[in-house]
Image: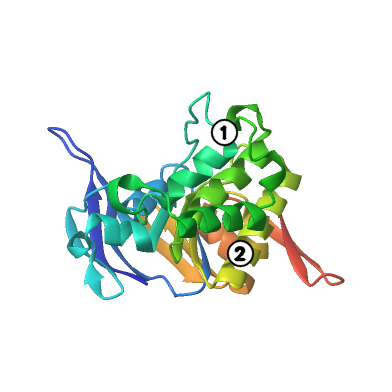
Amino acid sequence: MFDLKDVTFQSDGKNPKTLLDTITVDFPTGAFSAIVGHNGSGKSTLLKLLARKNKLASGTITLDGLALDEHGTRDFARKVAYLPQNPVVPPHLSVRELVAFGRYPWRGAFGRYRDEDHAKIDQAMALTHVTDFANRLVASLSGGERQRVWLAMLLAQDAPVLLLDEPTSALDVGHQRDILQLVANLKDQNNLSVIAVLHDIDMVGRFADHIIALRAGQTCWQGNARAFMQGETLRDIFQTDIDVIHLAKHDRFVSYVA
């Protein structure tokens, strides 16, 4: 999957600022990886590097052993699907029309949709449970429904890697859980690798297999969910007085600020 070695990223301008500094991390194939940390720690910047929306200043990023810039545009889009924060929806676009955009790397000559494309669109909508409102305008949907439509678009893209930038940031806690459970289920059902920027500590502990924590543009911790959901670990990552409670009945940890 993605391998990063000594990756550095700087802002543009006369006085560039280093936003990521010598990041070295391997994202495991087939895992739900979460990127966590303070606001401004470089989480979204790192995800944009993986999505080729930012260009690194130094270091190397490879995907399947090949440098990112050596992948052709269409080849890369067939491997990696990216959902940014707060994507803008054209006001007159239906659910099916939006999901169909995911087929752009696969469409035939002159951008025509083939039977295979329509089948992938139908499958993606079924997997995300949005078929019933396929003809509704995306702009008319609730936040949770809209997030499922975006996920359907990514699934229609048929890429084995999903990059999600704060996919639950505008949702209430119930819809956060539902969306992340859906992502986790889709990962298992379709053999996907997921890398998501997430803020909610408990959701990270519940759904992520692999976690990387950033502080001031540098990696400050990596590990699995069980090691992450420990008071000492959380206090070190977030530099605040956090502790956890173990819910033995569900074998789950819940964080709280002391």
Which residue is label 1 attached to? 94
Q: Locate residue 225, reporting x and y percent.
A: 61, 69
Q: Residue at x 58, y 60 (%)?
A: 234
Which residue is label 2 attached to? 186
Front one among 146 and 202: 146
State the count of labels. Answer: 2
Circle 2: element type? helix
Circle 1: element type? loop
Q: Residue at x 18, y 64 (%)?
A: 70
> Above or below — where is 227 with respect to 245?
below
Give the Cα distance between marks 2 and 1: 23 Å
* Residue 208 in view (yes/no): no
Task: Decide: few, some or many residues near mark 1? Use Cα within 10 Å; few <14, some 14-19, many ≥20.
Answer: some
Q: Locate residue 137, reporting x and y percent.
A: 61, 29
| Labels 2 and 1: the sequence-earlier one | 1
Front one among 226 and 192: 192
Q: Residue at x 12, y 32 (%)?
A: 14
Image position of 37 (left or right of 258): left
Q: What amino acid type is highlighted by mark number 2?
A: Leu
Image position of 144 (left or right of 79): right
Q: Residue furthest left?
A: 14
Q: Locate residue 180, reporting x and y percent.
A: 64, 56
